Amino acid sequence: MLVGVLLSALAAVHGSSALGSKCSSAMTKGTKASSAPFWLNSMPTRGSSSFNSNSSYSVRRSVKDFGAVGDGKADDTAAFNAALSSGGRCGAGCDASTLTPLVLYVPSGTYKISSPINVLYYTVMIGNPGNPPTILASANFTGAALVDADPGYYVNQNNFYRSIRNFVIDMRQLPVTAVMNGIHWQVSQATSIYNVRIEMSRASNTGHVGLWMENGSGGFFGDITINGGAIGLNMGNQQFTVRNVVVNYAQVGIYLHWSWIWLFYQITITNCKVGFHIQTGSTSASQATGATIIADSSITNTGTFLETSTNQPGSLKSAYAVDNVVLKNVTTGISDMKGNIALAGGSKTISQFIQGTIYSGSSTTGKYTRASVTGVTRPSVLVESGRFISRPRPQYATYDISQFVSVKALGAKGDGVTDDTAVLKSIFAQYSGCKVIFFDAGTYIVTSTLTIPAGTQMIGEAWSTIMGSGSYFSNPLSPQVVVRVGDAGSSGVTEISDMLFSTRGPAGGAIVMEWNVRDPSGSKGAAGMWDCIIRIGGADGTNLLAENCPTSSYSAACMGAFLGLRLTKQSTAYIEGLWIWTADHDIEDGPQINVFSGRGLYSESQGPVWLIGTGSEHNVLYQYNIVGAQNHFLGIIQTESPYYQPTPAPPAPFTINSAYNDPTSFSTPGDSWALRIKNSSNVLVYGAGLYSFFNNYDQSCVNPATCQDQILDIDSTSSKITILGLSTVGVVNMLSYNTKATISQSPNRSGLQSSVMKWTK
Ligand SMILES: *[C@@H]1O[C@H](CO)[C@@H](O)[C@H](O)[C@H]1NC(C)=O
Ligand SMILES: *[C@@H]1O[C@H](CO)[C@@H](O)[C@H](O)[C@H]1NC(C)=O
Ligand SMILES: *[C@@H]1O[C@H](CO)[C@@H](O)[C@H](O)[C@H]1NC(C)=O
Ligand SMILES: *[C@@H]1O[C@H](CO)[C@@H](O)[C@H](O)[C@H]1NC(C)=O
Ligand SMILES: *[C@@H]1O[C@H](CO)[C@@H](O)[C@H](O)[C@H]1NC(C)=O
Ligand SMILES: *[C@@H]1O[C@H](CO)[C@@H](O)[C@H](O)[C@H]1NC(C)=O
């Protein structure tokens, strides 16, 4: 296929730019003429997959180059699936691979399909955000879903790297009663859906479902509108963060059938029969939902706001919290299906309603509650009009192609071999603040610290990678930063999206990212990062793979990083969709591996900090360490302890470094802290899923919940801390106070996980 036809005359200018003097005009807004194409459509395709032996593999394609017509009449199914699969991509028979990333661009139009579009592993599917393309199911459509992220090929907990943005999914030509899903999204970490509208039948007997997931380990999605359907969102997954979903005219807006921990916030439900249905209180051995949080939402002209499935609580206990939810003309507030009403309807604001156990401070006993309780005091710096702030990912829909520069056009190689440090430094020096810096797909090697100045807007292409490599990053006793975002104390609108930050081992001294930048005064959430990944090992090019880092061994060559992400004292940050993953397995070949990264996310920030839909896994000392910090909103966080622990036990193979406020004691038999909050105030955790699945690779500890003794520690010098929704797996004690075990998992057990709905101090 001639992907080169995407090249427009304007874009060619960007192919020949030479570095000159710093551009003068600061860029505040887009200048695209309304008739001009979306910038991505005009950007030449220079992206590559650095470690794919097929040097002609094309990372970005337009569906039009594969024969899609988009006139609402032609059947475009084959064109989509050819565009998604050609070039030896990871589909049926392939569990996973980082070698065939793809950005599939879909211009405006109506694309009729008669069977599913299979969004294979490592696919980013982008429609024109200015006028999103429609994917229209033909009346004779057959298959499980219009858009399918797992047609049965993948292990659901390892189904990573997928994003869909800017589409309309139209199911209205299907028979009204057809049982059909708009999107099947059985996925795990590093996945997102943004800016999608799903149109379904509004008939009361319809079988249409907007978004369906049965399991997995996600994830984040947001900015979704759903009209009609039997169910808007039909959800089952270990954990998920869902922000800004609008559901109108559905029979059930959101149906949650299983989970460990889940956050729904900024949900708007109008004209539905039931707003939320949470499957609770299962009396069978199979678990239903764990802890669910519904926050900052509004429900209007709806029969029942929240319906639970059986009489409460049942033998397996489900917990939920309703936090700052406005009801307008709602017949019933909260009720089970037997008609037991827990909260009346009407028009009112629910400050907080809890079903579940509430604990506080050092108390070892909780109080089972099913009632309205005092809500959370939210620091004003974290909210706008009383709600936690929300910032959609930047897509630059109104920006003209002339407002972008391509790093490859400017001489960066991104080939996974060449040292790009100097050229990237000069690109940032010249273009930060006056052009959007486009990182064409590729792996950009840096051998010393690369500073991304405050005021930079940059965007990657299916997680373009900046990789720290070489001796500068190898000494764990003298840690060095790979990517520094802003100098200490600097401020400016700073936007990073669709990027991956990594290391090439050995790199035990690498601080993968140090975040210093802060919001310009008077703005909130202007310095941020969206849909990014910090990945240590497990992928080709890292030298941290099965052949040199087998399980049950320590090798100095397998030191991957000192620290994943550091938020420094003066920084502020809006971070949505970030996965800090120290590899537990080799993605290319499958086996488990021993890769050592010292620390996950370390924050000393005075805030405001919003961490929305983040995860941190398999780091040695801790996954999240919040010390001397304030004004943080964390919703939700998900962690896993390293599989090899306690062999070795932390801090091994690292040493404790007091300059980084490392913890000095660890859980028995030798495991990391998932979350540690010390000397901090106003830290609001809306959902924590903290898991320990192994004891030196043995999983027999999971069901008895004995993989580790403690996992979450909060110290007595911290104040104004709220944990709203805590679920743990494999751990004896759910929460510790001054490192003393306080909340036991055993009374709070519900299926595999244990859940507590609220802890305050
Ligand atoms: C290499 O990539 C090109 C472009 O994507 C594709 O057409 C070709 O089939 C690929 N070759 C193999 C062996 O996968
Ligand atoms: C389904 O309808 C499309 C036109 O919308 C047509 O091209 C296709 O052949 C039909 N498929 C079947 C199996 O009837
Ligand atoms: C995930 O869901 C599918 C479909 O319901 C089911 O077949 C499979 O067993 C589930 N897997 C896990 C691990 O729950
Ligand atoms: C209240 O909501 C019901 C649907 O539950 C709707 O039929 C009715 O028109 C609404 N009333 C007003 C005043 O909007
Ligand atoms: C606690 O944190 C504050 C910053 O919020 C810091 O100034 C103070 O020194 C810390 N106290 C201790 C004992 O570490
Ligand atoms: C949690 O433990 C308390 C006792 O502290 C118990 O009353 C409550 O039922 C448990 N909650 C759940 C969800 O199992």
Image (cartoon, grey):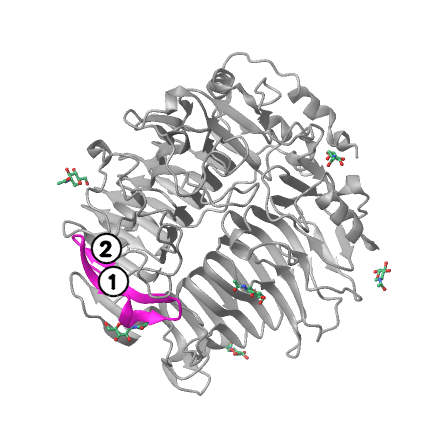
416 falls in the magenta region: no
- Helix, strand, or loop for circle 1? strand
Q: Position of residue 466 (x, y in %)?
A: 49, 29
Q: On residue 223, which mark appears?
A: none
Does residue 271 appear anywhere in the picture?
Answer: no
742 falls in the magenta region: yes
Residue at (21% x, 54% y) in the render: 720
Residue for badge 2: 721
- Helix, strand, or loop for circle 2? strand
Kindly report the distance in space between the C-alpha atoms of the residues bearing marks 1 and 2.
8 Å
**Residue pushed farthest front?**
552
Say if mark 1 contacts mark 2, CB within 8 Å: yes
In the image: residue 341, left or right of residue 43: left
Q: Position of residue 222 (x, y in %)?
A: 51, 54
Is the stretch drawn in magenta largely helix, strand or loop? strand
Q: Quadrant of the N terminus?
A: top right
Report the image quarter containing ligand 6. Answer: bottom left
Residue 746 in the image: above or below residue 606: below
**Of the residues under marks 1 and 2, which one precedes in the sequence?**
2
Does residue 393 appear anywhere in the picture?
Answer: yes
Residue for badge 1: 759
Tell me the kind of residue under disc 2: Ile
Q: Residues within 10 Å of mark 1 (few under 14, many from 20)?
A: many
Tell me the kind of residue under disc 1: Trp
In the image: residue 378, left or right of residue 665: right
In the image: residue 737, left or right of residue 588: left
Stretch in magenta: 735-761
Name the quadrant containing residue 494: top left
